[in-house]
Image (spheres, helix red, strand yellow):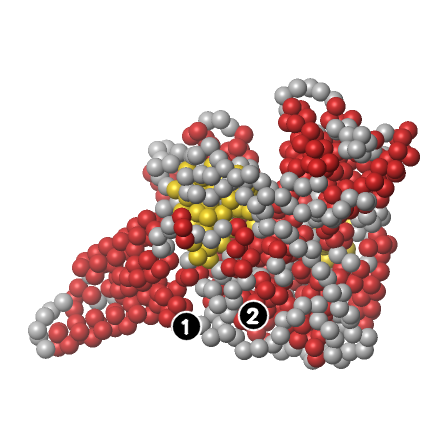
Amino acid sequence: MLSHLKPSLESGLTALKQGDNQTAIAILKVIATREGDRPVGLQAQIGLVVAYARSGEVTKAIFWCEALSQNENPQIKQWADNSLEQLTKRNQDDVSNVTTGFVPFENSLITSIGQEKKSERVQEEQGKMKEIPNPTTPVSPSSTTNVGIPFNHAKAKPLAIHWRQAERAKVWQPPQKPNLILLRLLMVGTFIALFWVMRELLVFVMILTNNILVKLPFLEPIQLLYTDPTIFLLLLLLILISLSPWLLDLLLTSLYAQQPLEKEALNRYSPEAVRVLQRYCQHKGWRLPKLSVLPMTSPMALTYGNLPRTARIVVSRGLLEQLADDEIATIYANELGHIAYGDYVIMSLVLLVTIPAYQLYQLFSKWGDRTSQKLWRLVMGIMATLAYGVWCLLTGTALWLSQLRLYYSDSFATGVTGNPNGAMRALLKIALGIAADIQTEEQTSLQLESLNLLTPVGYQQSICLGSIAPHTTFESFLMWDYLNPYRWWFVINNTHPLMGDRLQRLASIAQKWHLATELYLESQQPLRIKSQSFLLQIAPFLGIPLGLVFAALIWLGWQMAFLLKFLNLKWIYDDWSFVTGCLLICVSIGILIRMNSFFPEIKPQQVQTDDSLPDLLANPTFLPINSVKVCLVGKLIGRRGTRNYLGQDLILQSSTGLVKLHYMFSLAQKVLPQDLVGRKVIVTGWLRRGATPWIDVQTLQTQSGKTLNSPHPVWSTVLAVAAEAWGAYILLKG
């Protein structure tokens, strides 16, 4: 059951004093993330160090201690340095001084928090802490590297996130009932796509199994595997839809520790959410959806079921603790929208078939990481990668439905609550909470990724938005999302729509209701960007229509030559395989044309550094083809071992935020980038601004001088040459 405690500094320190370290961690983490380097935030960070140390989580205690050691306040810095030294020794020596206290701060600070008999002293020291001035971040001495960028560079001074707390409507006209034709078509299309992908995968496995059995001695193929699985698979999917509420209950309870959320417990966090649920369900004649909670620090919510009476709304504990009353209500109203429009039925089916594939990925990864035998580890890594690829394929069938349904539910939520500004704050705080959780855990949570498709905000879009927010305004960062005229091309493979576009639509609703808006996202025409840049960006994809035109011209030429009895090659090309050859050749030409612009030479004197990152990402005219040359310093975070064989979870934690990294493996290197996770690195590469900002890595360099090369241009060239050669072979062979 959820705790009734509100996330306040007093409740966190009280829990710490009483020895309830897990409750203290859950509360103080929220305060530390929200308050940053303000006095209350510093107290929370110190409390987190003590709580983690007492719980035996020394690595996390060191993480928060390192953050405090960067503070320019000499007393805080001295306390953090001394505590960091003791924490480091704790892994080597069996001493107990860390669990009982740290080096004192003004001779008495957190050392007395855990001592019940000295509560008055604790209160006195808390009073001292409240007088701590707001610190600034100092410039550390730098040690240059062979690329000319310092490791211990000056961190950009973070800005406090200011919430305008724009008001809600007191009287409003709900939006007109939307046209659901497109949503319904996408639901049908998603089901068909999911069925087709599953059928192709099943047929492939059946054929592969029988082929293996044929080649093995003393074994015979299984005749059942030669049958058409279409009817069986269709019936299976229909059965899964009918049982999805109970099957997902079982999966989420056993795998994600889902717990019931009583209405009274929800009422402690958001009385308005309870009123919204009761009022709307009573109006529709529905039973109140079953409410549940996940013990996750990342704020998230999802809805599943197959009928309104079997619907379930699930939220995370992080969402309840990090959002305000009215903001929680808008999220619940958003989830009600999925029930009202029925899209949750198909999304429940997708979640039901993707969770097992993701669990296989986790299982193979766990087996691979547990062994020291290189061959077995490699086999398990390959199996984990294949399972992850299957999960991506199945998830990809619902990408467009996942995007579109959120526009409908956003509009529905504002109509039910009359609070578009609260909805805007809720979405932004979810992004902030997800980014904070990724930074704290130093990887993307497996639970968060596996449930990402159904959440209100995607973790991919939260990585940069949620972490860079203290260094720039939301309005500046989000301009790309609603002003770039080519933005729609870069969201095709995303699970969630562009955040800026969603917030701009909510802001327009607030303006129609004559409300001041939480963000100033003015409706205006998209910016004008030279079409040449965009055409160069999509050059490989333009090879597809150009290849068809090329094939048509070749076909006409052959037909004319045959009719004129000039050249008799018609018999060679009767099977139309030459069309594939033309497509491959034109796509490879497009890759080569784009190559120089996509991967320009990086010179040390031309690179942009961490301080310029917020300004670069705020430019609404950038396209990925612009290839900004950067050299950033920070910590490499992400998953370790076989969980990250594809490099899908590599993130740079720089002084100004998190940035996704795309790394291409080199066959000549024995060290993998996931082996460097947790270490400070210098990343050189090409920053690209798309729906999700990322860096195509050229090199990863550690403090010790070890350098990993990421040969993006080499692999692109190999791909282009291979496609060209294959296409030419098809044309010549006929």
- Which residue type carries mark 2? Tyr
Most extreme residue toward the top is 94
Compared across the picture, whether 39 is left or right of 587 comes to: right
Q: Is residue 704 above or below residue 589?
A: above
The residue sitting at 63% across, 61% down in the picture is 473
Closer to the eye: label 1 or 2: 1
Q: Is residue 59 above or below residue 416?
A: above
Of residue 620 and residue 482, the one placed in the foreground of this image is 620
Choose top left, top right, bottom left or bottom right for residue 563: bottom left
Q: Which part of the image, by quadrant, shows the N terminus? A: top right
Compared across the picture, whether 604 is left or right of 58 comes to: left
| Residue 581 image offset from top left, x and y in percent | 26, 61
User: Tag 2 or tag 1, which sits nearer the N-term?
Assistant: 2
Most extreme residue toward the left is 566
The residue sitting at 42% across, 30% down in the picture is 375
The residue sitting at 28% across, 72% down in the picture is 549
Which SS class for mark 1?
A: loop
- Does the rendering let one see residue 352? no
Where is mark 2, residue-wise? 482
Q: Is residue 650 above or below residue 290?
A: above
Where is mark 1, residue-wise? 530
| Residue 412 image offset from top left, x and y in percent | 70, 71
Which SS class for mark 2?
A: helix
- Which residue type carries mark 1? Lys
Compared across the picture, whether 656 is left or right of 601 comes to: right
Of residue 67 and residue 277, the one placed in the foreground of this image is 67
